[in-house]
Image (tube, helix red, strand yellow):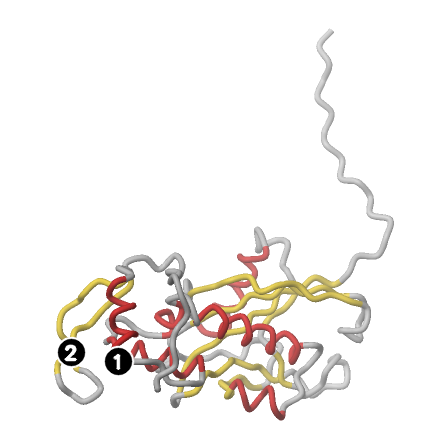
Amino acid sequence: MASKTQPRRTPKVTFPLPFTTVDVVIFTVLDEALQVLLVQRPGTSDDPCPGAWALPGGFVDVGRDRDLEACARRKLFEKTGVVSPYLEQLGSWGGAERDPRGWSATHVYFALIPGQGLPLAKGANATEVGWFDVDAVLRRQKLAFDHGVILKAAVERLRSKVEYTSLPAFLLDEPFTLPQLQKMYEVVLDRPVDKSGFRTRMLSADFLEETGYVAGDSNRPAMGYQLRDRSGPVVFPRTFSPRQ
């Protein structure tokens, strides 16, 4: 007699589960400064960090999010309306003390997006939303939970990778000029880079394609470029040299 396949039973959970969230460190460049998107939490007494500024994020929705990256992209879209920017997993933070509500773990991503003319949405659990100068936040502002520690780690990761990759191109609308791209590098690195060496490296890496002449920063025609592949950055064989 053929045996019938028994329905798979979901094991009963007999131990407390931690809160699981995803936070997104969203970077852009505005006013010639590296900036991060922050949201202000409600000032109500039932909020764990009333009135504090925080990185955008929230709880994983098991009915909507197929994985952590899907949750990160959903949170990013809810705040900025951007569907597919550069997104990279930064790391995870967890512990019994980081959230007054209980043991929690957050999985953090960072995103790079062009910021000019980008509309921002506050979302259901935020009273304000805005761009903030990264270095000013790290120097003076206390963020909710352990978001100050997370932001510092994200800035260090970004600046480290910019030394040897094409990441700053994801901060620009296309088409862009080489001087505009160099400016992105200098803003993120917080130092100048050699102009002649920069141009040579960008063109020899073969990750840009010409789009035709566009208006440059000095209103003179300049060659415009776009990325050949937006799925990830190009890695250069060596880091940038400071401009003398």
Residues 11 and 238: in front is 238
Helix, strand or loop under label 2: strand
Residue with the mark numbered 1? 179
Q: State whether residue 94 is above or below residue 13.
A: below
Residue with the mark numbered 2? 222
Residue contact at pointers 2 and 1, CB within 8 angstroms? yes
* Quarter of the image where the C terminus is located: bottom left
Percent coordinates x, y for residue 56 in the rendering: 58, 74
Give the spatial CA distance, label 2 vs label 1.
9 Å
Percent coordinates x, y for residue 126 in the rendering: 60, 81
Helix, strand or loop under label 1: helix
For image coordinates 76% across by 35% down, the residue present is 9
Tell me the kind of residue under disc 2: Ala
* Quarter of the image where the N terminus is located: top right
Q: Is residue 9 left or right of residue 128?
A: right
For image coordinates 74% across by 65% down, the residue present is 94
Percent coordinates x, y for residue 187 in the rendering: 41, 83
Tell me the kind of residue under disc 1: Pro
User: Quadrant location of residue 183?
Assistant: bottom left
For image coordinates 54% across by 57% down, the residue present is 69
